[in-house]
Structures are given as C-alpha cells and as structure tokens.
Image (spheres, rainbow, N blue to C red):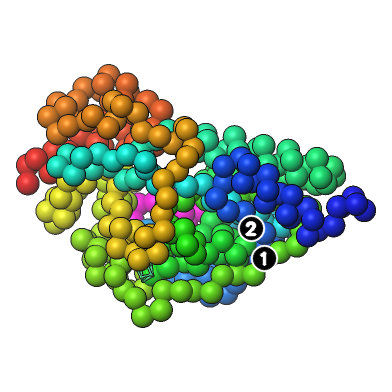
Amino acid sequence: MPSNCSESVACELLRAEARRLGFSACGFARAEAVDDTHRQALADWLSEGRHGEMYYLTAHGDLRSDPRLLLDGARTVISVALNYYPVRFLRNDQYQFAWYAYGADYHEVMRDKLHRLSAYLQSLVPKAAVRVCCDTAPLLERYWAWQAGLGWIGKNTQLIMPHAGSCFFLGEILTTAELEVDRPYPNRCGSCRRCLDACPAGALTAPCRLDARRCLSYLTIEYRGELPAATATQLGNRVYGCDECQRACPHNRWVTPTSEPALQPSAAFLSLDKAQLQHMTESEFRTVFGNSAVRRTKYLGLMRNVHAITEN
Ligand code: SF4
Ligand code: SF4
C-alpha cells in the first residue's frame, strides 16, 4: 500500500470507482477459509444430492472452501453487485423469462467491469496481484458478498441487500492487497417465510434449504433431461427460470430498474409472443437470444420447456 493511500482510503476510492462503473455495491472481506457452518451446509447439500445434476459443484471442494487457494497470497475478497431488475417487462399473458435473462449475458458485462475495477486497484496498489471471478472460479459468491457486508443470505438462498433487494449479479476480485474489511451483514429475514410459501414447486424445503431437483429455475435452465410430470403443471407460463421467491420477498419492494445499457431487453425479446415461441426455429433462437443468458438452456432446452407447457 503506498504511504499516501491507507487501507481505508483505498477502500473508499474503490467503492467510488465501483459506483462509477455502475455497480450498486462494493464491499471487502478477509480472504480466509469459509466458516464451518457454511462449509458443512454445502457438504450436506451435496451429499444429499440436492444439487441435482450440477456435478461441477462437487468438484474443487477444497478450492471452494478457501479463496487463498485460488490466488496465492490472497488477503482480500472484493465483492460487487450489479443490478439487473428490468425497466420493461414481458406481458403477463405471454411466456415468462427470469428477470436476470432479459438483457445481454451478464458474464461479459460483469467481467469487463471487474477488469476495469482491478486495473484501478492496481493503480492504487501497484504490486497487488488480482484474480477476477465471475462465475468462473469455485467461489461461494453469496457467502463472500455476505462477509463483505453487502447483505445477508435470505431464506430463499438469495443475497438480499438492505434497501435494495435481491435482483443483483455478484462478482468478485481476489487480491493480495490488504484492504480494510467490512462486517458480515446481520440476517433480517426474522419470522418471515413468504418465499417458502410462494415457491410453486416446494423447492425451499426449509429456510435456506433449496432442493434444486424441484426448483423450476434449475429444471428449466440447467437440467437436460425430460421434465418431471409434476413440473409441467408447476411451470405456469415460465419457460426460462423462475422469480417467485424473489417476487415474494418484501425486501424487493426497494428494487429499482437497472440503468446498465447492456442489460436492457431488446425490442425483439419484449415482443415475443406464445405463437412465436411455439414455432421458433433454431435460427430464430440464435437471432433473439444470441447474446443472452438464455443460450445456456440451448434451443432444444427452451423448446422442451415450451412444449411441456403447451402439452399440459
Ligand atoms: S426459483 Fe422458483 S421454484 Fe426455485 S426456489 Fe425460487 S420460487 Fe421455488
Ligand atoms: S421472503 Fe422473507 S424469509 Fe424469504 S428471503 Fe425475503 S425476507 Fe427472508
């Protein structure tokens, strides 16, 4: 750290730069082993098979439990949040997509901003090594966002930011720079259980316990097989993802629309109607979703979801 830039000054400069880049929040946590409670919760979740077929989550357990194994000499985890709540919405009587997938694939947007924030950090601390993480490293993103004081992990397993809600992408920078860390945010769920009651699939089997095998978000996006019969009846109009446990959360009354240009929905997306999706060709899929997170489910996955609804 240069003598004219204390840890706390560097943090405030970094927060200001993060805001200038369009992040809604930026916090700092000490890079150290994940606490026993969260490590055990992850181990239990995996051993009970509640991750479904997301087998990649079973790999790199050691790396996932300590960010210092991802960057030699890491001292700080910088956690940032990028708002994705849409400005405009699909019509309610049309097939629905998760809010996070309305705009461009967030990975590219997030990565670019994280690299710019890293470059700024290295201008303040020239010797600092950095590693940008955006869904690309085995890191417990919500845990680190909580540790960095951004918010708390709600009973719906989402990171909830005070007076802002849960509609945020998370990203991280690991660095060898030793920065002044924030305090983990206290949990504010209290006796509320609206998310558990609102889940159409019973996937939140207890507070903070998600069974991905029942979750409509997992089933419509990550899962590759035929949808279970019960799922088709639970889908309603949802063809890609599900936001019910976020819609139900009273802390999302604070949401404001994202101002990030890349995350704005295209006219082609907003005008999608049921007939168009039912008869969509692969080439049309590439045109409408070529730059979108919806590519993750691939053409056949989206068609599987559409047909499950129409056949039901
Ligand atoms: S995303 Fe939907 S199905 Fe999954 S836990 Fe939330 S409400 Fe339930
Ligand atoms: S709906 Fe209630 S219990 Fe669920 S995450 Fe929000 S505040 Fe917590």
**For residue 259, side relative to residue 270 (left or right):** right
Classify the position of ligand 2 by quadrant: top left, top right, bottom left or bottom right. Answer: bottom left
> Can residue 116 be seen in this snapshot?
yes
* Residue beneath disc 1: 182
Mark 1 or 2, nearer chain start: 2
Q: Quick check: marks 1 and 2 in contact, CB under 8 Å?
A: yes
Q: Report the front residue among 302 and 86.
A: 86
Give the structural element (helix, strand or loop) at label 1. Answer: loop
Identify the residue at image location x=54%, y=56%: 141
> Can residue 131 be seen in this snapshot?
no
Residue at far bottom of view: 191
Residue at far left of view: 312
Whether 53 is drawn above or below 111: the answer is below
Identify the residue at image location x=73%, y=38%: 119
* Residue beneath disc 2: 27
Magenta segment boundaries in residue numbering: 52-59
| Disc 2 residue crowd, few under 14, some 14–19, many 20+, Cα 10 Å | many
Q: Report the front residue among 163 and 281.
A: 163
Question: Could you tell me how far apart the alpha carbons at marks 1 and 2 are, in whole angstroms?
Answer: 6 Å
| Disc 1 residue crowd, few under 14, some 14–19, many 20+, Cα 10 Å | some
Identify the residue at image location x=47%, y=33%: 261
Identify the residue at image location x=41%, y=59%: 254
Q: Amino acid at mark 2?
A: Gly
Mark 1 Cβ inside 8 Å of ligand 2: no
Disc ID at residue 207: none
Q: How far across and down, in percent of the image, does residue 190 sit?
A: 41, 79
Whether 180 is drawn above or below 229: the answer is below
Q: Amino acid at mark 1?
A: Asp
